[in-house]
């Protein structure tokens, strides 16, 4: 039996580490996780941190069901890993969703899957495995539902959620030679990140993203010049995604090409649509 879940990534509007509150926007870079159950034992995966993956599986599927079964997981991702583009949240969400669907099939349950239960399982696993400092509830929500999110990660509450304009694009720079620094340094400017959270909570996402870009780049020593150039070329907003080193700009299609051209001097550049698409799960075998 195989179940496949599909998810997408996201970019940061406001980093959640300084205050525990963050804001994100879904983007159309996809991830899928196919989970199979067969006779045998243990958990295997074609890629990723197996301890983290096992943490997710064991939080969803009771041990008495899998004690004499083998759980195989195949992950396929278009999201560059280690750049702050929410690949961890997307993968953990996808695995958790596929596992919940698999569990429902085994138990003969036809009820709709509880979306927040899936997200919370992924967040719990992220915290337990120390993959995330705050649990990345904001990232998980944007990956799962799409659109703009503002959340309180520690309370796991949604402050604001709304669809993004379907005509928006995200241009993403994967800069060469830029390394991430200790993200806990961001807490030193918590007061100013609070202003950015307030802006996002009031729906001023672009102002929030621009302020976040200034703050994160200054603390983590990520070059600000590409961010400024994107804004000068007509982006609505630009900033560091997550803890970097990726830089993202939100714009319409008419200016995306000029930003891509400008940023090509700094490294690899991706152009993707924003996403309002909710996660999907299906039986494939």
Image (spheres, grey):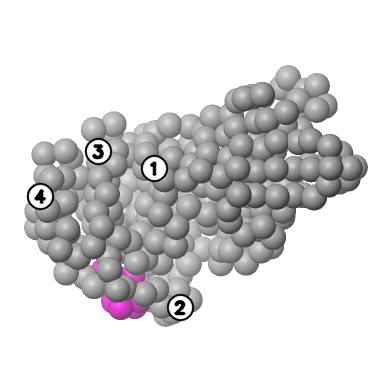
- For marks 3 and 2 on the same chain, the one whose residue lies earlier in the sequence: 3
At horizontal 66% and vertical 38% (from top left) the residue drawn is: 35
Nearer the observer: mark 2 or 4; the answer is 4
> In the picture provided, is 248 more to the left or to the right than 17?
left
Q: Which span is picked out in magenta?
A: 212-221
Callout count = 4
Does residue 278 lie above or below 269 as drawn? Answer: above
Mark 2 lies on a secondary structure that is loop
Q: CA distance from mark 3 to mark 4?
A: 15 Å
> In the picture provided, is 135 more to the left or to the right than 159?
right
- The dot on residue 29 is 1
Q: What percent of the width, then of the height, locates residue 163?
A: 37, 34
Q: Is residue 144 visible?
A: no
Q: Which residue is mark 4?
A: 258
Check if mark 2's residue and mark 4's residue have beta carbons within 8 Å: no
At horizontal 25% and vertical 41% (from top left) the residue drawn is: 169
Check if mark 1's residue and mark 4's residue have beta carbons within 8 Å: no
Say which quarter of the image contains residue 28.
Answer: top left
- For marks 3 and 1 on the same chain, the one whose residue lies earlier in the sequence: 1
Q: Which residue is mark 2?
A: 182
Q: What percent of the width, then of the height, locates residue 202?
A: 34, 48
Q: Which residue is mark 3?
A: 168
Nearer the observer: mark 1 or 2; the answer is 1
């Amino acid at each position: 039996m195989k179940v496949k879940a599909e998810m997408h990534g996201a970019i940061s509007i406001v980093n959640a580490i300084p205050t525990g509150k963050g804001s994100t926007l879904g983007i159309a870079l996809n991830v899928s996780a196919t989970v199979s159950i067969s006779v045998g034992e243990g958990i295997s995966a074609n890629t990723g941190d197996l301890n983290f993956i096992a943490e997710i599986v064991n939080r969803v599927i009771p041990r008495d069901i899998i004690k004499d079964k083998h759980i195989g997981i195949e992950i396929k991702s278009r999201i560059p890993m280690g750049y702050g583009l929410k690949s961890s949240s997307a993968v953990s969400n996808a695995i958790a969703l596929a596992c919940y669907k698999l569990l429902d099939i085994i138990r003969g349950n036809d009820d709709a899957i509880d979306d927040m239960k899936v997200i919370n399982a992924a967040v719990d696993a992220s915290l337990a495995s120390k993959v995330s400092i705050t649990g990345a509830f904001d990232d998980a929500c944007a990956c799962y539902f799409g659109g703009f999110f503002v959340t309180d990660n520690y309370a796991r509450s949604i402050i604001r959620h709304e669809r993004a304009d379907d005509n928006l694009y995200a241009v993403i720079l994967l800069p060469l030679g830029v390394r991430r620094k200790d993200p806990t340094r961001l807490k030193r400017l918590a007061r100013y990140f609070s202003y950015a959270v307030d802006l996002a909570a009031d729906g001023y996402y672009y102002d929030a993203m621009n302020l976040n870009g200034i703050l994160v780049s200054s603390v983590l020593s990520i070059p600000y010049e590409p961010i400024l150039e994107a804004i000068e070329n007509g982006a609505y907003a630009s900033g560091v995604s997550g803890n970097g080193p990726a830089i993202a700009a939100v714009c319409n299609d008419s200016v995306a090409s000029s930003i891509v051209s400008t940023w090509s001097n700094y490294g690899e550049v991706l152009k993707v649509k924003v996403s309002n698409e909710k996660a999907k799960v299906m039986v494939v075998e």
